[in-house]
Amino acid sequence: MSQQGYVAAPPYSQAQPGMGGYQGGFGSGPAQPLYGHYGSPPPQPGAMKSPVSSAAGMPPPPVSSQYNLSAQQNGAHIYPAPPAAAAAYGLPVQSQYSSMASGAPHQTQQLTNQMSSMNLGNYGQAPLRGPPPPQASSVAQQPFQTPRPALMSQQQMHPGPQSPTVVGTPMAGHPMAGHPMAGPPMAGPPMTGPPMTGPPMTGPPMAGPPMTGPPMAGPPMAGPPMAGPPMAGPPMAGPSMAGMGRPFPGPPSSGPGGFQQPGLGAEGPLGYPQQAGQFGGPMAGPQPGMPGAFPGAPGGLAGPPQKRLHPDSIPSTTQVIEHDQEKHEGQVFTTNIRGQIPPLVTTNFTVQDQGNASPRFMRCTTYTLPCTADLAKQCQVPLATIIKPFASLPENETPLFVVSHGETGPIRCNRCKAYMCPYMQFIDGGRRFQCGFCSCVNEVPVSFFQHLDHMGRRVDFYERPELSLGSYEFAATLDYCKNNKPPNPPAYIFMIDVSFSNIKSGLVKLLCDELKTILQNLPRADGADSSAIKVGFVTYNKVLHFYNVKSALAQPQMMVVSDTAEMFVPLLDGFLVNYQESQAVINNLLDQIPDMFADSHESETVFVPVIQAGMEAFKAAECSGKLFIFHSSMPTAEAPGKLKNRDDKKLVNTEKEKTLFQPQKGVYEQLSKECVAQGCCVDLFLFPSQYVDLATMADVPSHTGGSVYKYNNFQVEVDGEHFLRDLRKDVQKSIGFDAIMRVRTSTGFRATDFFGAIHMNNTTDVEMAALDCDKAVTVELKHDDALNEETGALLQCALLYTTVGGQRRLRIHNLSLNCSSQLSELYKSCETDSLINFFAKSAYRAMLNQPLKSVREILVNQTAHMLACYRKNCASPSAASQLILPDAMKVFPVYMNSLMKTTPLVGSTELSTDDRAHQRLSVMAMAVEDTQLLLYPRLIPLHNMDTSVEALPAPLRCSEERLSDSGMFLLENGHSMFLWLGQGSPPDLVQNLFSLPSLAHLQAHMSSLPELDNPLSKKVRSIVSSLLEKRPNSMKLHIVRQKDKPEMLFRQFLVEDKNLHGGTSYMDFLGLLHREVRQLLT
Ligand SMILES: [Zn+2]
């Protein structure tokens, strides 16, 4: 047995061309052939399956106590005693991981079988007649023709390009001008003299080797630039269109019984009630007991063609959400079953990890993969997992344990490099383990040896998270660190644009005041008294000002770099400091900055040099970190990355529209790579008053795990609090730095495409300068061989990163899925919210290369294709006039229609190009809950709620029909929030909420509610603040009166209605889909 067997080649230090330097250890290593190439089938592991008997004489070593030690490291968490239910999970260990699934009854069946057939297609008085369809499906009659979405064709010119002008230096006479460079901390050439007027400080101003040192031998950026097949590939193009015209080749419709699951009894293992359909409705039929009823919509399957559907008769997202919440209320979701479908992302529930990652970390478009690529192609249901590695856990769930395997590092499969996990099967008396991913048999290192019990399970099963849990962390060894050195704690640099508009708007003062508080709340390591994160400060317009805020100084010192062509950092010592130590100097600086630039009329800015400066500072300090850039305008000053106005509304709805969203290449692209290599994440807070070419300016943030916030025409009074809430949330977020993620799979399929605020240097390693608790990576999965129903399919996401405390760790999430050769099983296990997350990201990426019209057509076609395939293969025969929706995808069309109406995809000249680009980029890193809410906002009635009850009033469908003249409604989608006031709002409501006699007295642009001492005011404000608290972003509250002009904005979010800027109503979209499905079936 060789200790080196599981210690990979040093992952960071041995860079390999094109592989980002991680390949040896963290990356694929010897298993490269398995993952490295598209299309090449992996080697068949069959030969490896029979255990080799060479290690027969291995002595059983004492049980290692490493785990206990490391568990203490993690704070006060005590690994819980195995819960009663856990026993079942581990029982039949002999048959490796498949036992996880086959041992227990399948909840998936339970969940989906209870969904009943229902009739969507009736209206008015038609009585329920025909036999309801026997299967899990929804049926909608399609009695009328619907027009395709009308596209707006209006065109409008944007103001022409701004001509760049170079203006003189701005800082005449500010308080610090007298003694800018003089102070003692500057060891080298003293850099005296007036900072602003002298020659630009080219050349190394500091003695010693400050900037020019070895430029980070770590992960080189050598390889192919911006890896991967960028847009064209898998998600949108190809197959979705390809198969459209053909008849469905696949297996004949085999009905629901084809895939029998053992032990599928009458009662579910967790007590899920055998309820009838969650959509409720008037369909009596075989489902008595259906909750709720749609008034005025009695069923009528076999009725004559109808003229108009009642809005209540089409599937309702709010009901699906409500029903799922009721079903899971008060229950614990235990992750001990393979392929188990979790509660909806909108449902409040508690998770207990029993061998699979919590759905908070990983969700899938379907929890049953089709066995073959042919089946996958046939149904066109995308196979993908959405991973949010740092998802926040509620307080009643256990944080991840940290495991240490000692100096040799985490134990891994020799062949595929998968990490020790519950899918490794111990054999040969515990001396070897067979990898669940590649079947390779590995020696168990002496230090990790443990005896097996009579069930064949290690006796330390419950003591080791890596044997019994879906998610945990490993302490990484030096092999996993850059240059084999432990990392330094990360740093945050605040970079403030002090050009004229930011000063004039009051932003700079607002920000500097707030920073004094925010800096006290920097993220800290578990159990640490204070944050290890260092901070630094830069201000800039067309030159950069660095500040020495060393604690020994009485006054901060400024250094100016005006040569922005070759950016460097003019000081090392004193630039990045500990906030606690330098608090006095920093507060002094923050007090001075607004005044220093108060008289500045400089309106030009640079941008790329600002990011470069931050990155260089991290490089010099040998750390990773985040830049917080507060920027006002398009960078037009003469410097690298200078931009021109290229907004052109004439391009909207043309072949060239895509160019509006493509970032400018060159220096921005290069900068992204350098930032990722350094672990430099960029967060951009934009305060534009006009076009800034957001597509380009956001390019670096969107490849470095950063966020982009945008405040159009920023006014302190209206937007100040909104911005500060964003900033506070962002600074305090839990986050990991210098991250690289790899998704490993069992044989037969693999991860082929990745979406997120990420950088890909090769086809497998997802690199992120940082990753916070709200960011997700969507990973597309494809077959390269057949999958096995018995063994299922395994996923392991491994994320190597640096903690805020400067520790190198590996975070592991494992998930096991079912496989089936029956498409009906796949459709039952689909998750609409995850599907739409995938579709949104793939469509938003595709629009960089294809006309929007094609993208929208592909979306419609693929949706129709999924439904047609279901109908042909899974549903029982029914009249052609019915639209059949699989239960798990019942509300998929409303989300899909909403997606096509989002501003990036809608193609209207009335929308701002920057706003569209902004939404496009934000969605790319969104988790499932965020795309769900974005595409189906919450509409909450406030006028008739019981103010004494704590619960939120039940949300309504997002349609104008749900509004009432005398009502008040709150709408939020995670990015915008509206309080809509009906014209006939009762005076007492208006009085209680605004202290005004009537709505006519309401001020325009109000963005907060007055604090009044009455139950309604308190309740509404508490609802607003609880929603703000929950979401990753702050939301500006827009208060709009019915029929006022700003109401138009609000109406865009009523996603079931026709959209102002183009796009059909939900009802019409169902009609459109139905027509497409019928075409496919004939
Ligand atoms: Zn393996």
Image (cartoon, rainbow, N blue to C red):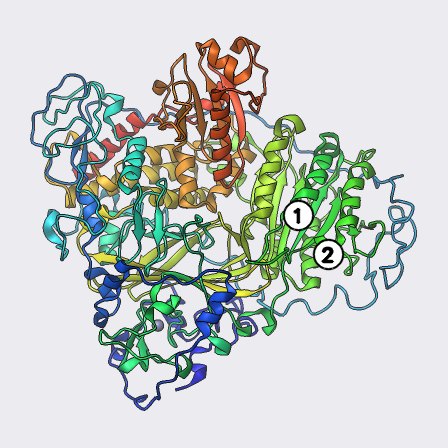
- The location of residue 467, given as percent across then percent down, is 35, 68
* Ligand 1's quadrant: bottom left
Secondary structure, mark 2, is strand
User: Mark 1 and mark 2 in contact (Cβ < 8 Å)?
Assistant: no
Residue 45 quadrant: bottom left
Horizontal placement of 824 versus 801: left or right? left
Which residue occupies 59% across, 37% down?
725
Disc 2 marks which residue? Answer: 577
In the image, 410 versus 414, the foreground residue is: 410
Mark 1 is surrounded, within 10 Å at the Cα level, by few (under 14), some (14 to 19) or many (20 or more) other residues, namely some
Q: Position of residue 804 (x, y in %)?
A: 58, 58
Callout 2 environment at 10 Å: few (<14), some (14 to 19), or many (20+)?
many
Q: Can you tell which quarter of the image residue 188 is in?
A: bottom right
The answer to whether residue 1043 shows anywhere in this view is no
Mark 1 secondary-structure assignment: helix
Q: Which one is in front, 762 or 110? A: 110
**Mark number, residue 573:** none
Query: Which residue type carries mark 2?
Result: Val
| Percent x, y of residue 873 | 15, 46
At 81% from the left and 68% from the top, the residue drawn is 208
In the foreground, 272 or 391: 272
Percent from the top left, x then y, of residue 1074? 23, 32
Residue type, label 1:
Gln
Report the quarter where the C terminus lies: top left
Whole-number angstrom distance, CA of label 2 to CA of label 1: 13 Å
Please name the residue that numbered disc 1 is placed on: 520
Q: Give the residue displayed 17% in from the left and 50% down from the top.
A: 249
Say which quadrant the N terminus sits in.
Answer: bottom left
